[in-house]
Image (tube, rainbow, N blue to C red):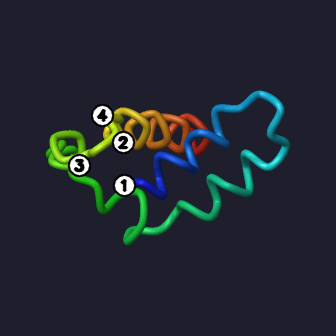
């Protein structure tokens, strides 16, 4: 979850010119879509971050891109 949260930080940055490449790298059944949004990562995050929200936004971007 932490890696996906960091990936979202770059994807959401309007200055980033490699958004498409980053989304391509996450398009794999064993990466982004391994998350089942159970939110255990939010409960145990020592920094109080919300990786589930970031993962959901990345999934949304990928779905929009494929439509």
Q: Which residue is mark 3?
A: 41
Identify the residue at horizontal 80%, vertical 49% (top origin). Answer: 18
Residue at image coords 55%, 42%: 8
Mark 3 crowdedness (10 Å alpha carbons): few <14, some 14-19, many ≥20: some
x and y, in percent, of residue 43 in the image: 16, 41
Residue 6: x %, y % from top left: 54, 48
Q: Quadrant of the N terminus?
A: bottom left
Mark sitting on residue 48: 4
What is the distance, in whole Å, between disc 4 and disc 2 at their CAs?
Answer: 10 Å
Q: Which residue is mark 2?
A: 51
Q: Are marks 2 and 1 in contact (CB under 8 Å)?
A: yes
Q: Earlier in the sequence, mark 1 or mark 4?
A: 1
Tell whether label 2 touches label 3 (CB within 8 Å): yes
Q: Point out the tag, 3 or 4, that comes first from the N-terminus.
A: 3
| First-in-chain label (2 vs 1) | 1
Quadrant in the picture for residue 31: bottom left
Secondary structure under the numbered disc 2 in the rendered image: helix
- The residue identified by callout 1 is 1
Q: Please tell me whether mark 4 or mark 2 is closer to you in this view.
A: 4
């Amino acid at each position: 979850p932490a890696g996906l949260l960091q990936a979202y930080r770059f994807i959401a940055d309007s200055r980033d010119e490699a958004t498409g490449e980053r989304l391509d790298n996450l398009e794999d059944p064993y990466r982004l879509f391994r998350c089942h949004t159970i939110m255990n990562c939010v409960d145990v995050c020592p920094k109080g971050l919300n990786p589930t929200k970031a993962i959901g936004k990345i999934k949304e971007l990928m779905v929009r891109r494929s439509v």
